[in-house]
Amino acid sequence: MRVATARGVTTLTLDSPHNRNALSTGLMTQLLAGLADAVADEAVRVIVLDHTGPVFCSGADLKETAAAYASGTVPAGMLGDVLEALWECPKPVLARVGGPARAGGLGLIAAADLAVCADEATFAFTEVRIGVIPAVISATVLPRLHPRAAAELYLTGDTFDGRRAAAIGLVTASVPADGLDDAVRGYCDSLVRGAPGALAGAKELLRRPGTAELRADLARLSAVSTGYFLSDEGREGVMAFRERRAARWVPALDD
């Protein structure tokens, strides 16, 4: 992960393009450390979550997940810690989404206070297609999404674009790709005008009824997520994805 600070804005850049910024244990550990450092630095007023490469975040690192099955644990169990750190961060967090986001990547976007994406960016809750469910990310995603949209997109796993992401509440705004940086800069310029203590207090108001319930929800949902990844369907789905084949539950098409 890359870290850069200028004019009160720290940018944490997901920098693992070789696996489409998948949420590996290493990347999540770096992200947690970067967030903690930014919170501790009094000169930092705003945190931007950015990415290198064409993909914002492809979700769980399925290669690492498959390798971890023998241990009975999966990297997805750590995602709750990352979402909690983003959600409870006392400083404004803004996600800059220039490309596709899938599964756990949508949890990161929803955990940010503000999110701006390119119109061309695509999104999908692909979990059911690999035999798992969007459990842990639901703690941050469902408060953002319109209920009917959540039902449709959770159950179908279908892809949708930036404009729809804005319409259903997943992101704050969707803009043409060539205007993305200007939009992010505009939000940052507005955010740094707020008093640090007042911004933290405003975030507490927005997070009611409280952080204790979120923490309990994330702990419960992390256990649910791990259970699905370790299930027979989860194992089959991960392997089918890695082997670029249909999972065994997909009906065969008639010739």
Image (cartoon, rainbow, N blue to C red):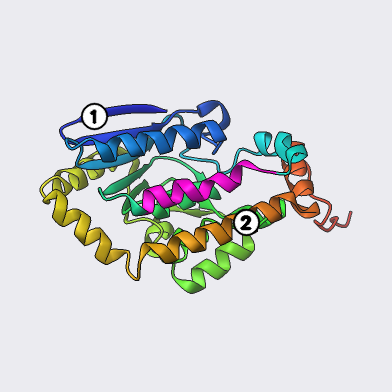
Question: Quick check: 142 above or below 171?
Answer: below
Q: Residue at x 47, y 65 (%)?
A: 142
> Does residue 224 show up?
yes
Quadrant of image for the N terminus: top left
Return the residue found at the far right: 255
x and y percent of residue 158 in the render?
59, 57
Over which residues does the magenta segment extend? 73-87
Q: Which residue is mark 1?
A: 5
Toward the viewer: 146 or 236?
236
Judge from the rendering whether residue 228 lies leftward or rightward of residue 172; answer left or right: right
**Secondary structure of the residue carrying numbered label 2:** helix
Return the residue found at the far bottom: 148
Toward the viewer: 158 or 171?
171
Please check the rendered image and state whether residue 49 is part of the magenta-colored stretch, yes or no. no
Q: Which residue is mark 2?
A: 223
Please check the rendered image and state whether residue 78 is part of the magenta-colored stretch, yes or no. yes
Mark 2 crowd level (few <14, some 14–19, many ≥20, 10 Å Cα): some
**Secondary structure of the residue carrying numbered label 1:** strand
> Does residue 135 show up?
no
How many marks the image carries: the answer is 2
Q: Residue at x 31, y 34 (%)?
A: 37
x and y percent of residue 175 in the render?
31, 49
Q: Which mark is residue 199?
A: none
Toward the viewer: 113 or 184?
113
Question: Quick check: 134 above or below 178?
Answer: below
Mark 1 crowd level (few <14, some 14–19, many ≥20, 10 Å Cα): some
Q: Main secondary structure of the magenta part?
A: helix
- Amino acid type at circle 1 is Thr
Q: CA distance from mark 1 to mark 2?
A: 35 Å
x and y percent of residue 75 in the render?
61, 41
Q: Earlier in the sequence, mark 1 or mark 2?
A: 1
- Amino acid type at circle 2 is Ala
